[in-house]
Amino acid sequence: MKKLTGLFSLAALTGFAGMAQAADDLTLQLKWVTQAQFAGYYVALDKGFYEEEDLNVTIKPGGPDIAPTQVIAGGGADVTVEWMPAALSAREKGLPLVNIAQPFKSSGMMLTCLKETGVTGPDDFPGRTLGVWFFGNEFPFLSWMSQLGISTEGGAEGVTVLKQGFNVDPLLQKQADCISTMTYNEYWQVIDAGITEDQLITFKYEDQGVATLEDGLYVLEEKLSDPAEVDKLTRFVRASMKGWKWAEENPEEAAMIVLDNDATGAQTEEHQIRMMTEVAKLTAGSNGALDPEDYERTVQSLLSGGSDPVISAHPGDGAWTHVISDAALN
């Protein structure tokens, strides 16, 4: 009997070991390259917050030739970081993206102009050349110009749109009167190039009442019909928001964690610390749950594109859900 009992115990232990679940794999596609804009996710990875939630998370950097919506559509990621204008535009075109969390509460987008051009306000935009990012980032700008009643086809009464690369060269080389910048990135590249803040005038989309939501977490709708996926996404959002709040409170250390994950070696300590300090202002006030009023403001802004709106119809509540964020908060 003892021998049998021993064999049974061994079999039981072997069975239990086999039952032990491996960590769930999850791939996150970032909107852009490794930088403090995404610090919360790198912090969650570095500090073991994902591991605590039994997750094995892979973070895939973006870049100028990477479209996050295409990556997730092709099955290359489970979750993607995207701006809502691009996500809603893709949804209307047939890609069923759903916002499951909104770590960024405020917009960091600005139009930055040289004072010497004489631009003092939006009334001075007609006849000017404005640098605009494309690849889905143009939607907030086009919506703003539409609300101002300013054509983007050029001419004395309109603005000439310069397709801006992801740099500040058009302003430095005076090819454009104003360029697109983010409060946490390109604006400081202008300053680092030797132009003083006194020589600039900025127009924050947030202040102009045309800010649209940035850096939300999106998944394909089908994942939300699978209880196992919902559970995995809940754990991911919970750990990610823990990472974001830690980054807000420890910006310098968070920046160093980002640098440790920058395989390109292109980022600098000074720039990343400054970026993290600015990004913390945008994530402040968010517990991860999308604010329906912010969503509605974004939608109305995108619908008000005159003859060429970003989206042609209200996407409805299906474009976002509180199921994941509510569960993550509990």
Image (cartoon, rainbow, N blue to C red):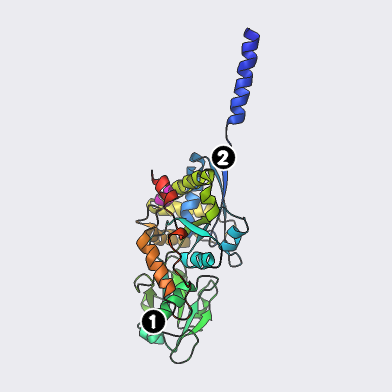
Please say if 22 is above or below 31: above
| Residue 295 highlighted magenta (yes or no) | no
Pointer 1: residues within 10 angstroms few (<14), some, or many (20+)?
A: few
The quarter of the displayed image where residue 77 is located: bottom right
Distance from Cα at disc 1 to Cα at disc 2? 51 Å
Q: What residue is shown with label 2?
A: 23
Q: Which residue is mark 1?
A: 148
Q: Position of residue 126 (x, y in %)?
A: 42, 87
Residue at 37% over, 55% down: 286
- Res 205 quadrant in image: bottom left
Which amino acid is tagged 2? Ala
Query: How far from the left and from the top, in percent, is residue 253?
Result: 44, 51
- Going from the N terminus, do you reach mark 1 or mark 2 first? 2
Q: Mark 1, mark 2: which one is toward the viewer?
A: 1
128 or 310, which lies in front? 310
Q: Is residue 296 visible?
A: yes
Q: Residue furthest bottom?
A: 156
Picture layout, residue 274 above or below residue 242:
below
Element class at badge 2: loop
Image spot of residue 260 (x, y percent): 54, 52
Q: Position of residue 39 (x, y in %)?
A: 47, 55
On-image quarter of the C terminus: top left
Give the farthest residue toward the top. Answer: 1
Residue at image x 36%, y 85%? Answer: 123
Q: Which quadrant of the rendered structure holds the N terminus?
A: top right
Kindly identify the amino acid type of the residue bearing the numbered disc 1.
Answer: Leu
Q: Secondary structure at mark 1?
A: helix
Residue 194 visible in image? no
In the image, what residue occupies the spot 49% across and 88% down?
154
Looking at the image, do the residues carrying marks 1 and 2 touch, with CB atoms under 8 Å apart? no
Read off the magenta span: 241-245
